[in-house]
Image (cartoon, rainbow, N blue to C red):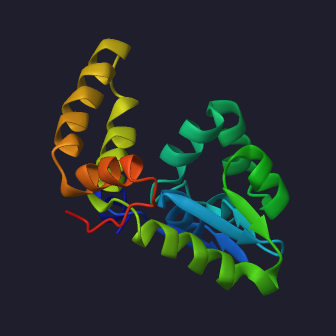
Amino acid sequence: MIIRIRHMEKPVIARINGIAAGSGASLALSCDIRIASEEAGLKQAFIGVGLVPDSGSSYFLTRALGPGRALELIMTGRTVGAKEAENLGLVNQVVPAAELDKVVDDVAGKLAKGPTRALGLSKRIVNQVSRLDLHEALEYEAQNQDIAGKTQDHLEAVRAFLEKRQPKFSGT
């Protein structure tokens, strides 16, 4: 499931309302955008049952936080509250629990109206660039920009700009 989320060329939003522990935290971390209620938290629970991180936790935490902070969370198994998770960059946004569904729906709606192919290509680029040096990353961006530049969505965005209106993307 983690691999499918990362390779799916569509945005995936994690809606976190409560404690995401162990593989639940891994699943949340694998998503592209994470929105949490103020009551949410992330917990690397593996150590508490004599296990090591799995489902990508070590991968996502190390990339987000560096090895020292990742190991601290993995080795202590402490719960990271929503606000701390936001400060650390583990979640994108924290909202009151009563607003969580609306905020997630609003973000999903905005993405759904966006240029589908460009969103997918952007995700592809971000997934790949950490393995590349700068020269390779620039080349990879240029290759994907060439693909995006040939879409109907790009042409619609240019027309909309010239006509001083909002684009209406079709996903093609």
- Quadrant where the N terminus sits is bottom left
- Looking at the image, which is closer to me, 75 or 3? 3
Q: Please give the name of the residue rendered at 25% of the width and 27% of the height, measured from the top-left corner.
A: 142
Give the farthest residue toward the top.
135
Residue 150 pos. (x, y %): 15, 45
Residue 76 in percent (x, y) is at 77, 51
The foreground one among 55 and 171 is 171
Query: Looking at the image, is 154 positioned above or below residue 48?
Result: above
Q: Quadrant of residue 20?
A: bottom right
Residue at (71, 80) in percent of width and height? 100
Question: Can residue 22 be seen here?
Answer: yes
The extreme front residue here reads 163
Q: Is 75 drawn above or below residue 31 in the view shown?
A: above
For residue 70, side relative to residue 63 (left or right): right
Q: Residue 119 location, x and y as percent?
A: 36, 54
> Which quadrant of the structure image shows residue 131?
top left
Q: How many marks?
A: 0
Q: Tell whether 134 sits left or right of 142.
A: right
| In the foreground, 5 or 55 | 5
Q: Is residue 76 left or right of residue 22?
A: right
- Residue for point 75% across, 54% down: 85
Quadrant location of the C terminus in the rendered image: bottom left
**Please, is residue 106 above or below residue 51 in the view?**
below
> What residue do we see at 29% from left, 30% from top?
141
- Rendered location of residue 46, percent (x, y): 61, 62
Query: Which of 157/64 is in front?
Result: 157
Question: Taking the image as drawn, is residue 81 in sight?
Answer: no
